[in-house]
Every structure is written in structure tokens, then in C-alpha cells.
Image (tube, rainbow, N blue to C red):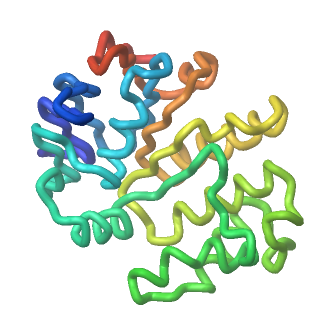
């Protein structure tokens, strides 16, 4: 697969309610290469969240093939998918998804517990990298929205993932803070070479990436390089 990190081939996803089938994804094909920064755009109901769940190994497709590097993950068990998430994928969420009872340091280190390599030293390095070297012991309610997202970004890097999924990472932030967070995410790609797939509704943010994939009614309608 050359230098492809993500490869999707005819990915379909349907849900059944009683005897009625609802088709959400209707044959998705695309690849993301190592070091790319790709934006995924589309209206509500287009299938973005379902697709993101599949790429994030949180759900499995009804049919089709999904590879991460050379590993076929679309047919794995739940336990195997959990292993894939821990080893290959970093997540940045719109709502931060920090555990309120844990400090910044503990929130960042948490994913490393599941790899049996509890790593507070790396957590400290990552918090310092995102400018929070003085917030190790602060809990989420003691941080601003921008600081919480910085904690989330540091957490996404703790296991040195192959790629990062960012779901509306600036959606809950004001414009100034959002720009700071976007600059930080861009630096992960440009300075550290991280492969990133970002879901966004903001065309201005999408223009900062390498490529934009447009989704509508469960299908890719177009792709364009930026």
C-alpha cells in the first residue's frame, strides 16, 4: 500500500430498525497518505459521524474493506479494534472528552495505561509542548476551553499514533482561541509530520489542509486539493 495510512474500499454502512434498512454510507473509497492533512466536509446527515466512527475503529462497516497501513481492520473483533485505537489512532473531540476528576497530567497519560506503558514523563513533555507546563495539576474545570483542547491534543499524542482524527476541534471555541488551536494542529502536521483527518463545517479551516473530501447523502461528491 506504499505510504498509505488509511485505505477505504467500497465502505457501506446500514442500520436496521425493525425490518427497515437505512443506508448511511453507500460506497466510500479514498486513501490518505502518510503526512497528509485532509478535511472531511458535509451537511448534517451526510454520514460524516458514521464514517469517522469506522475510521476511528469505534464501529465496523456493513461491507467493504478498511486498512490501516497494511492491516485489514474492517473485520476485527471488538477487542482487536480497541487495540487498534490504542496503538494507531489519536482522537481530538469538539467537546474535549476529558475526565473531570483527573488532572491535566492524568488525562494526558490515561491512554498509555491501556498499552501497559504508563507514561507520565511523556505526558509532561506533551503538555509542555502545547504550552501547559504550568497546568499539570489543574483539573478540567480549572482550565479555559482553549486550555482543555490543548490537553486533549496532548492526550491524542501520548501513544505516538499513526494518525489523528479531529472532530470539529474548534467548534466549541471562540474565533481567537479557535485560531490558536488550529495553528497548533497545523504544527502537528507541518512540524511533526502527523497524518490528520479533520471533520469541519468551516470552509476557512478546510482551506488550510492539503485536500478536502466532500460527503453528501452517504457518498463522496467531490475531492479537491487545496
Count the numbered circles shown. 0
Q: Quadrant of the N terminus?
A: top left
* Residue 205 falls left or right of residue 63: right
* Residue 147 falls left or right of residue 113: right
Q: In the rendered image, which quarter is residue 141 located in? A: bottom right
Q: Is residue 165 above or below residue 124?
A: above
Q: In the rendered image, which quarter is residue 186 located in? A: top right
Q: Residue furthest top?
A: 221
Residue at 20% across / 40% down in the picture? 7
Q: Position of residue 93 (x, y in %)?
A: 58, 48
Q: Position of residue 221 (x, y in %)?
A: 31, 10
Residue at 20% across / 23% down in the picture? 26
Q: Is residue 109 above or below residue 212?
A: below
Residue at 52% across / 43% down in the picture? 166
Q: In the rendered image, which quarter is residue 214 located in? A: top left
Residue at 43% across / 27% down in the picture? 40
Relative depth, front residue between 119 and 106: 106
* Residue 183 falls left or right of residue 71: right
Q: Residue furthest front?
A: 18
Q: Is residue 40 above or below residue 66?
A: above
Q: Position of residue 202 (x, y in %)?
A: 61, 21
Q: Is residue 142 above or below residue 172?
A: below
Relative depth, front residue between 41 and 37: 41
Amino acid at each position: 500500500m506504499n505510504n498509505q495510512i488509511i485505505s477505504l474500499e467500497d465502505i457501506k454502512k446500514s442500520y436496521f430498525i425493525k425490518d427497515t434498512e437505512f443506508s448511511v454510507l453507500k460506497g466510500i473509497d479514498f486513501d490518505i497518505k502518510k503526512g497528509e492533512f485532509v478535511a472531511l466536509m458535509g451537511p448534517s446527515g451526510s454520514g460524516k459521524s458514521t464514517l469517522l466512527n469506522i475510521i476511528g475503529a469505534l464501529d465496523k462497516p456493513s461491507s467493504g474493506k478498511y486498512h490501516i497501513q497494511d492491516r485489514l481492520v474492517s473485520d476485527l473483533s471488538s477487542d482487536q479494534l480497541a487495540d487498534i485505537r490504542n496503538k494507531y489512532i489519536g482522537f481530538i473531540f469538539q467537546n474535549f472528552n476529558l475526565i473531570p476528576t483527573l488532572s491535566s497530567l492524568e488525562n494526558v497519560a490515561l491512554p498509555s495505561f491501556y498499552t501497559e506503558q504508563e507514561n507520565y514523563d511523556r505526558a509532561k513533555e506533551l503538555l509542555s509542548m502545547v504550552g501547559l507546563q504550568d497546568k499539570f495539576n489543574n483539573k478540567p474545570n480549572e482550565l479555559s476551553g482553549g486550555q482543555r483542547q490543548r490537553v486533549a491534543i496532548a492526550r491524542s499524542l501520548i501513544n505516538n499514533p499513526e494518525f489523528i482524527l479531529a472532530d470539529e476541534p474548534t467548534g466549541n471555541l471562540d474565533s481567537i482561541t479557535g485560531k490558536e488551536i488550529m495553528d497548533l494542529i497545523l504544527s502537528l502536521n507541518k512540524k511533526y509530520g502527523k497524518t490528520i483527518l479533520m471533520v469541519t463545517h468551516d470552509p476557512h479551516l478546510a482551506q488550510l489542509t492539503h485536500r478536502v473530501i466532500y460527503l453528501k447523502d452517504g457518498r463522496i461528491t467531490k475531492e479537491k486539493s487545496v
